[in-house]
């Protein structure tokens, strides 16, 4: 039997690679950047999700053979002109501190009538150091005025997706994963890969 082609996920976040493995693991041997501990951390210096996703995919792909998939995601808030956007993970002043990020978001949104927001995710597929294709998924919704729910991560306790009346943190992983920005981008990646002659 032929070995499966390898798909390297340009992240050290095992939650992301597990989610991706669950969707496309039967056609690829899915590994993430933890398999390459010597690789330098790639700085996300872009000003758009696409630029950052490209930096990660092309950076890893220039060092290793096979398909590389990266993603970059965040929350865009209408009343804040699209912020925090690419700066979602450090909005509260400390990289990856979700409690501080949510506290700042609540403060900035206090008294604002326009609660519209969306999560967006952009993914880049690369090979031999260059982008092959990119994909974007979004989920529209609105922000609530206090934290609700204990599931998910990040801004999930403040975000109600369109068509629901509970936050992502209350809805749980199954519902979230069925409509999330990441799964919507990933569905397009799967369609693209299924149409390729993968070796
Ligand atoms: P990254 O794509 O892992 O760099 O995500 C950047 C930041 O966007 C995270 O640290 C979160 O603050 C936010 N974010 C991205 N996706 C989600 C999500 O599904 N739920 C809540 N917050 C998210």
Image (spheres, helix red, strand yellow):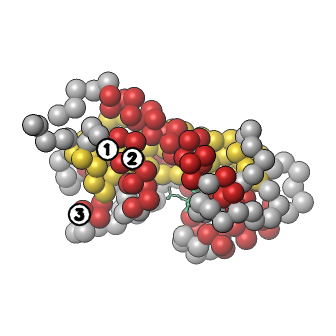
Residue indicated by mark 2? 22
Whole-angstrom CA distance, mark 2 to mark 3, is 21 Å
Where is residue 158? Give x, y as percent.
73, 59
**Which dot, 3 or 1, sits closer to the camera?**
1
**What quarter of the picture does the C terminus occupy?**
top left
Where is residue 46? Give x, y as percent.
48, 54
- Looking at the image, residue 70 sits to the left or right of residue 29; the answer is right
Query: What residue do we see at 11% from left, 37% from top?
Result: 2
Sequence-earlier tag: 3 or 1: 1
The part of the image, by quadrant, that contains residue 188 is: top left
Query: What residue do we see at 69% from left, 67% from top?
Result: 102
Looking at the rendered structure, which numbered label has been put on residue 25? 1
Q: Is residue 48 above or below residue 92?
A: above
Where is residue 176? Give x, y as percent.
60, 48
Q: Secondary structure at mark 3?
A: loop
Mark 3, other Cα within 10 Å: few <14 / some 14–19 / many ≥20: some
Mark 1, other Cα within 10 Å: few <14 / some 14–19 / many ≥20: some
Where is residue 159? Give x, y as percent.
71, 53
Mark 2, other Cα within 10 Å: few <14 / some 14–19 / many ≥20: few
Residue indicated by mark 3? 36
Q: Quadrant of ligand 1?
A: bottom right
Q: Are marks 2 and 3 in contact (CB under 8 Å)?
A: no
Whole-angstrom CA distance, mark 3 to mark 1, is 19 Å
Q: Secondary structure at mark 1?
A: loop
Is residue 127 in view from this perspective?
yes
**Which dot, 2 or 3, sits closer to the camera?**
2
The part of the image, by quadrant, that contains residue 138 is: top right
Q: Secondary structure at mark 2?
A: helix
């Amino acid at each position: 039997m032929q070995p499966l082609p390898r798909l390297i996920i340009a992240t050290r976040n095992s939650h992301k690679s597990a989610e991706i493995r669950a969707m496309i693991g039967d056609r690829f041997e899915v590994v993430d950047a933890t398999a390459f501990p010597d690789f330098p951390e790639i700085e996300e210096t872009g000003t758009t999700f696409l630029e950052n996703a490209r930096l990660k995919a092309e950076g890893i792909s220039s060092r290793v053979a096979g398909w590389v998939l990266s993603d970059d995601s965040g929350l865009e808030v209408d009343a804040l002109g699209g912020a925090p956007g690419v700066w979602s993970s450090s909005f509260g002043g400390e990289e990856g501190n979700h409690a501080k990020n949510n506290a700042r978001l609540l403060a900035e949104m206090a008294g604002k009538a326009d609660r519209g927001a969306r999560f967006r995710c952009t993914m880049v597929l690369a090979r031999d150091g260059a982008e092959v294709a990119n994909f974007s998924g979004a989920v529209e919704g609105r922000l609530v005025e206090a934290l609700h729910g204990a599931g998910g991560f990040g801004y999930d306790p403040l975000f109600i997706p369109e068509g629901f009346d509970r936050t992502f943190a209350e809805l749980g992983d199954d519902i979230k994963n069925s409509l999330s920005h990441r799964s919507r981008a990933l569905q397009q990646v799967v369609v693209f890969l299924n149409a390729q002659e993968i070796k």
